[in-house]
Amino acid sequence: MGGVNIYAIIESGGKQYKVTPGQLVEVDLFDLAEGDSIELDKVLMLNDGETVTIGSPTVPGAKVTATVAGHIKGDKVFAYRFKAKSRNHKKTGHRQLYTVLTIGEILTGGAAEKPARKPRAKKTNEVTTDGA
């Protein structure tokens, strides 16, 4: 139907993201300047258009390169604390900082699908009758 569908599932900041080349992704804040490059090596799954490789826990040798497109603040989240009958209340807010990454290329690093395991032979309990 369409072109080759290459994508990877990566982990960053304890969260998982499905990324494709050229995509913009908002991840937790990295201490990098705008325009810097970064290699994300925690690739959990890789689809190169022909085969799907699932890591255990990561795919060995696979990397995703990205460049920092900028830094943004997320939506404001409010927390409200209220105590009845004492006229005590407090409202606080928080805005999470994010780094916007532009995904460059997905490097497979020669990752190949593991062959299926052979089933183990069942152990039999043989009784030996050596005189003792």
Image (spheres, grey):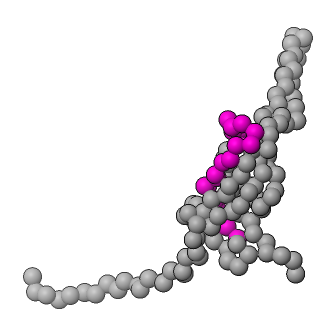
Magenta residues? 27-47
Outermost residue to the front? 35
Q: Can residue 4 be seen in the rendering of this structure?
A: yes
Which image quarter is the C terminus in? Answer: bottom left
Asked if 121 appears above or below 62 in the picture, the reply is below
Residue 19: image x %, image y %? 76, 59
Q: Where, by quadrant of the figure, is residue 91 drawn?
A: top right
Asked if 122 appears above or below 44 in the picture, the reply is below
**Count of labels in the image:** 0
Residue 115: image x %, image y %? 54, 80
Which residue is at 67% across, 67% downward?
46
Outermost residue to the top? 86
Q: Can residue 79 be seen in the rendering of this structure?
A: no
> Between 105 and 87, which is closer to the camera in this rendering?
105
Residue 66: image x %, image y %? 71, 52
Q: Where, by quadrant of the figure, is residue 44 drawn?
A: bottom right
Taking the magenta stretch, the answer to whether it contains residue 31 is yes
Which residue is at 80% across, 58% downward?
22
> Between 81 and 32, which is closer to the camera in this rendering?
32
> Between 70 and 94, which is closer to the camera in this rendering?
70
Taking the magenta stretch, the answer to whether it contains residue 84 is no
Which residue is at 90% across, 11% downward?
87
